[in-house]
Every structure is written in structure tokens, then in C-alpha cells.
């Protein structure tokens, strides 16, 4: 009868250590937005483009709504975007709202509708970026997630919508500011 202590296979001791190592390795390689420093900073809207499925090309998309804007990524997982219409900064708001007639009130309301702002937390996953909206000019969008495909070309960030907007597949080109 063998009275020597039984040796446990070495691999039984290694399994918990390997599991912990893998857990830490994958957790550290998560969707941390600070891992892609290319996003960090301020970007100015350069152009809206729409995709022509017949020719397979992108071209300038004329919109009365958005002609100017900025997007900001802080590198810590927070972002903000502000889009405005042509002439937005030159709109005359000197008159008191109480003194406006109905037509002037309608004009002002239409003006405010061309201003689009939201703040969000963001994360990147492969070549997509999710904006988890915290606030938005449209309250119905609070708490929603906006996903955009992205690519970088030199000093240009290209964000492409996955959904069809106003009958078009759109993308925005942002230039590093």
C-alpha cells in the first residue's frame, strides 16, 4: 500500500489562474473609447453626403437644415454635437418674444428647429461608434443609442448612418479643428 501523499495534477491549479488572466485580459481590451486617441478633440462639419446606390458613389447632399456644426470627443467616453442651419448665427433675436406677431413666432420656431444638439457617452466597437444619448434637443431621443460606422482619412473623420434618413443613406465628414 502506497502511503505517499497524492499529487494533484498541475493543470487543476493552473485553471483558476488562467481563467483570471483571461478575464483581466479581455476586460482590459474592452470598448474603452480612450484606447482610440484618433477621436479625441474637436471636429468641424465639412460636408453632408448621400449615397447613390445606382452609381455606387457618395455625393454632396444639399440640405436646408444643417450646414455648419461641431462634434467633440473628450477621449474619456463623452461627446457632444451641435448642428445648425445656414445663417443660424446671423438670425436676429433682438425682438422680445412677447412683442412678436404669429408669423414672427412661427419663423422663430422654425429657426429653433434647425438647431440640433445632443450630449452622449460613447464607445467604439470595431469600426462602429455608439452614442448613448444623455440629452438631446428632442426629448424623445434621450436614453437612445445612435450607431455610426466610422473611418479616418488623414485629418477627416467620416461618420456614416446605418439607417435611411430622409430617403437617403447619409454620412458626415468632419475635419479636425
Image (cartoon, rainbow, N blue to C red):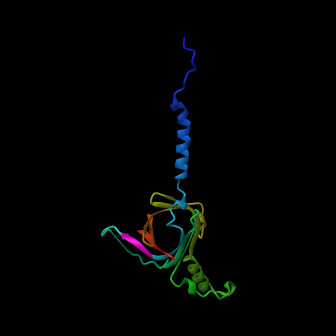
| Residue 113 picture quarter | bottom right
Q: Is residue 160 left or right of residue 34?
A: left
Residue 75 position, x and y percent, is 56, 65
* Magenta run includes residue 48: yes
Q: Which quadrant holds the N terminus?
A: top right
Above or below residue 168? Residue 29 is: above
Residue range in magenta is: 47-51
Q: Residue at the spot x=56%, y=79% of the render?
A: 110
* Magenta run includes residue 146: no
* Residue 163 in sight here: no
Q: Residue at the spot x=59%, y=60% of the render?
A: 143
Q: Residue 160 or 165: which is nearer the viewer?
A: 160
Residue 38 position, x and y percent, is 49, 66
Q: Residue at the spot x=42%, y=71% of the render?
A: 154
Q: Residue at the spot x=55%, y=52% of the render?
A: 28
| Residue 63 picture quarter | bottom left
* Residue 129 in sight here: yes
Residue 145 position, x and y percent, is 54, 60
Q: Main secondary structure of the magenta part?
A: strand
Q: Residue furthest left?
A: 55
Amino acid at each position: 500500500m502506497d502511503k505517499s501523499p497524492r499529487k494533484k495534477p498541475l493543470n487543476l491549479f493552473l485553471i483558476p489562474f488562467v481563467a483570471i488572466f483571461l478575464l483581466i485580459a479581455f476586460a482590459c481590451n474592452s470598448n474603452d473609447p480612450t484606447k482610440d486617441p484618433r477621436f479625441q478633440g474637436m471636429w468641424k462639419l465639412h460636408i453632408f453626403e448621400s449615397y447613390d446606390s445606382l452609381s455606387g458613389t457618395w455625393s454632396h447632399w444639399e440640405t436646408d437644415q444643417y450646414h455648419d456644426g461641431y462634434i467633440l470627443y473628450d477621449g474619456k467616453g463623452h461627446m457632444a454635437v451641435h448642428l445648425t442651419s445656414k445663417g443660424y448665427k446671423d438670425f436676429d433675436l433682438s425682438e422680445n418674444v412677447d412683442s412678436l406677431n404669429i408669423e414672427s413666432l412661427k419663423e422663430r420656431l422654425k429657426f429653433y428647429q434647425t438647431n440640433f444638439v445632443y450630449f452622449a457617452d460613447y464607445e467604439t466597437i470595431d469600426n462602429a461608434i455608439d452614442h448613448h444619448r444623455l440629452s438631446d434637443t428632442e426629448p424623445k431621443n434621450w436614453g437612445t443609442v445612435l450607431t455610426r460606422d466610422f473611418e479616418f482619412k488623414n485629418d477627416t473623420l467620416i461618420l456614416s448612418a446605418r439607417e435611411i434618413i430622409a430617403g437617403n443613406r447619409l454620412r458626415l465628414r468632419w475635419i479636425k479643428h
